[in-house]
Image (cartoon, rainbow, N blue to C red):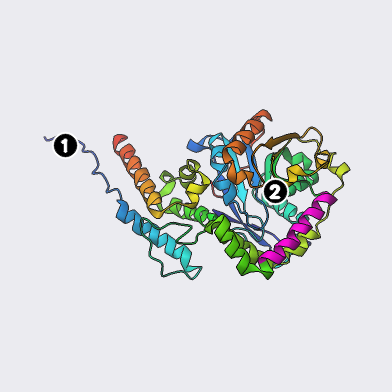
């Protein structure tokens, strides 16, 4: 584990001391040099880098990749500032993190849910730094996305904050103790920060701008998820995006079907060619 | 003149399950102290999630502590790579202790054979 310190440039909402993010990095076994760098970006509220660590990350490293995972601000073991949770700030964190890790060559970005939206945001901001983009149950930050996420955040504020005890009891009974524990952390994040209002105030991008993205893109959805059931949104994805619907899966497809996701990611990253120059050394991060 | 045959180094004692359990319990107590849960007994059948109320991210932190203590021989990421998410959530302290003991004895056999 390593805590990576991001300096606090204006506009991030961080204090003068910047922000500390928890980073985990896995390398190929036996000291083999990695063939490419992949950066895994987790989702909102109940999520953390653990969702990658316990699903696809070890296999990606075993396949020869340099795997970078981090807890986004407010999540997991990263710092939880009181404000500064608009999408564009999360994108800036990713940008600053890669700079801090001295990763300057193009990376494969993989994002789950909101992490996918962050990944699209980074690809739009720094297209030259992205070798490929793979998202799971995610949309780019179009005005439609903002309407959806704002509704979800409003519902969460009501359920998790105003009726926390009842909601947690329900989650414990129906989803088990571990999910309830995650929901409790999510409730704390929503209660103690401006995340709900900030996410809803995120800057959006036009569908036209999203369609200007030219990097190879893979978009995976659970066929039974709400997202997959919506009409017309596929046209908002970058042209040439390969869309995969996994039958029988819902929104939690990464947790529910990690083997499927693993297989898709490995073959897709392999197809993009792994002869991409590898990022700078492991300075400042854990090589474990 | 007497020639002394070089002797194989005496095998270092590999920590056994009780010793590793004591180590892991110590690490967990340090982690749990931060949450104010310092009076929980840690035994082989203690479950990380249900009994200790650890989140998955706490297990990632524990992985780092294990590597600091035992070195590269104990690779938590490789251990969990073979487990389903449900199995990770239901993991007991004993399963982890057994895994660590296995890793350490393998490492020792390798060291003796390589000498």
Question: Disc 2 vs disc 1: which is toward the camera?
Answer: 2
Residue drawn at the location 15% of the way across and 34% of the way down? B3
Q: Is A149 colored magenta in this rendering? A: yes
Residue A216, image quadrant: top right
Q: Position of residue A70 (x, y in %)?
A: 62, 51
Q: Position of residue A29 (x, y in %)?
A: 50, 37
Circle on res. B68: none
State the extent of the magenta-drawn residues as a range.
A142-160
Mark 1 crowd level (few <14, some 14–19, many ≥20, 10 Å Cα)? few
Q: Position of residue A59 (x, y in %)?
A: 54, 38
Q: Position of residue B50 (x, y in %)?
A: 47, 59
Between the C-alphas of marks 2 and 1, the distance is: 68 Å
Left or right of residue A8, residue B3 in this image: left
Which residue is tagged 2? A113
Q: Secondary structure at mark 1?
A: loop
Q: Is B32 colored magenta in this rendering? A: no
Asked if badge 2 and badge 1 are on a common chain, one would say no
Which residue is tagged 1? B4
Looking at the image, which residue sits at the far left?
Answer: B1
Residue drawn at the location 66% of the way across and 37% of the way down? A246
Left or right of residue A259, residue A13 in this image: right
Pointer 2 with pointer 1, Cβ within 8 A: no
User: In this orientation, which residue lies closer to the viewer: A250 or A205?
Assistant: A250
Chain that bears disc 1: B
Residue A22, image quadrant: bottom right
Q: Secondary structure at mark 2?
A: loop
Chain that bears disc 2: A
User: In this orientation, which residue lies closer to the viewer: B10 or A242?
Assistant: A242
Main SS category, magenta section: helix
């Amino acid at each position: 584990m390593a805590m990576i310190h991001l300096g606090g440039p204006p506009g991030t909402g961080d204090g003068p001391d910047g922000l500390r993010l928890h980073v985990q990095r896995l390398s190929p076994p036996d000291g083999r040099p990695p063939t490419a760098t992949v950066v895994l970006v987790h989702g909102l509220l109940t999520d953390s880098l653990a969702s990658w660590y316990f699903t696809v990350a070890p296999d990606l490293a075993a396949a020869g990749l340099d795997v970078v995972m981090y807890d986004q601000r407010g999540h997991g073991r990263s710092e939880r500032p009181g404000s500064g949770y608009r999408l564009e700030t999360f994108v800036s964190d990713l940008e600053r993190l890669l700079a801090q890790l001295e990763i300057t060559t193009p990376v494969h970005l993989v994002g789950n849910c909101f992490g996918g939206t962050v990944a699209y945001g980074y690809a739009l901001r720094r297209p030259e730094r992205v070798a490929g983009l793979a998202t799971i149950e995610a949309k780019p930050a179009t005005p439609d996305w903002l309407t959806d996420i704002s509704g979800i955040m409003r519902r969460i504020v009501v359920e998790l904050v105003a009726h926390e005890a009842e909601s947690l009891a329900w989650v414990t009974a129906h989803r088990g103790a571990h999910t309830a524990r995650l929901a409790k952390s999510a409730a704390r994040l929503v209660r103690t920060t401006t995340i709900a209002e900030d996410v809803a105030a995120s800057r959006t991008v036009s569908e036209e701008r999203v369609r200007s993205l030219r990097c190879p893109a893979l978009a995976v959805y659970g066929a039974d998820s709400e997202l997959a059931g919506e009409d017309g949104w596929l046209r908002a994805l970058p042209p040439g995006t390969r869309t995969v619907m996994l039958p029988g899966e819902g929104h939690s497809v990464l947790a529910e079907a990690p083997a499927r996701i693993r297989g898709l990611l490995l073959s897709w990253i392999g197809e993009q060619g792994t002869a991409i120059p590898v990022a700078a050394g492991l300075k400042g991060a854990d090589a474990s | 003149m007497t020639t002394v045959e070089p002797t194989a180094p005496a095998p270092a004692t590999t920590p056994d399950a009780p010793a590793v359990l004591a180590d892991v319990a110590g690490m967990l107590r340090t982690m749990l102290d931060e949450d104010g849960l310092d009076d929980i007994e840690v035994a082989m059948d203690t479950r990380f999630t249900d009994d200790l109320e650890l989140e998955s991210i706490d297990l990632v932190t524990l992985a780092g502590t294990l590597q600091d203590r035992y070195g590269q021989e104990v690779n938590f990421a490789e251990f969990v790579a073979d487990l389903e998410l449900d199995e990770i959530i239901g993991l007991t302290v004993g399963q982890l202790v057994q895994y660590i003991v296995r890793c350490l004895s393998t490492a020792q056999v390798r060291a003796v054979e390589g000498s």
